[in-house]
Amino acid sequence: MSEEQEHKEDVKPKLTVQVQFQSQVCTVKVKSTTQFKKIFEAAETKFGRSSGSFKYTFEGERIRPEQTPGEFNMEDGDTIDAHLEQVRSRYLYASILLLNYVAATARRLLLPIVLLRVLDSSVLRYLGPALSLFGLCYLYIYLSYSYNISLLWLTRSF
């Protein structure tokens, strides 16, 4: 019997870890040496989200998938918070701001189409690489409806 008791002592205890997202909770039993990526996969499956949709924190500290509960000295019943990862494109945001500024300035000054053509295509040539496809479409739609600039004029400028 003493051998069985020694064997049981060698087995690492399992922790019950909860992952909370809004009002939903996913409970997982793991060893303290299990990587968090297994816990994250179980939580994402339970919450019906794709892999990489969340960022996870424990007591305000960000958790990386390769870390383990042992590194955080987690105890049985501890809760991990799941937050949706926000994807932003700073280039898209900047291009929209730039286009809104250009459009507001053109509207305020009531630039006629002749003046816009005088601005030369070099202005758009320098702005082109910085603008996203969405931004270029927005610029085309705004200019075509506001000043009757044709698609040929815009495409020729690039």
Image (cartoon, grey):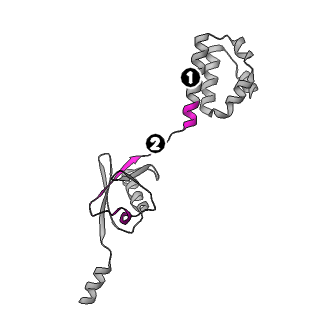
Q: Which residues are magenta?
A: 69-94
Q: Identify whether 21 is placed above or below 124.
A: below
Where residue 86 is drawn, which disc sits there? 2
Mark 1, residue position: 100
In terms of sequence position, does the residue under pointer 2 or pointer 1 come before the other? 2
Query: Percent from the top left, x then y, of residue 38?
Result: 41, 62
Choose between 56 and 155: the one closer to the eye: 56
Q: Could you say which quadrant of the image residue 150 lies in?
A: top right
Residue at image location 39% in from the left, 50% down from the top: 48
* 129 sits to left or right of 51: right
Please rate how many residues cluster around mark 2, counting C-alpha atoms within 10 Å: few if below 14, some from 14 to 19, many from 20.
Answer: few
Residue 36 highlighted magenta (yes or no)? no
Asked if residue 70 is positioned above or below residue 96 in the image, the reply reads below
Q: Position of residue 51 (x, y in %)?
A: 46, 53
- Split into 4 quadrants, where in the image is the N terminus? bottom left
> Measuring 65% from the left and 18% from the top, which residue is drawn there?
144
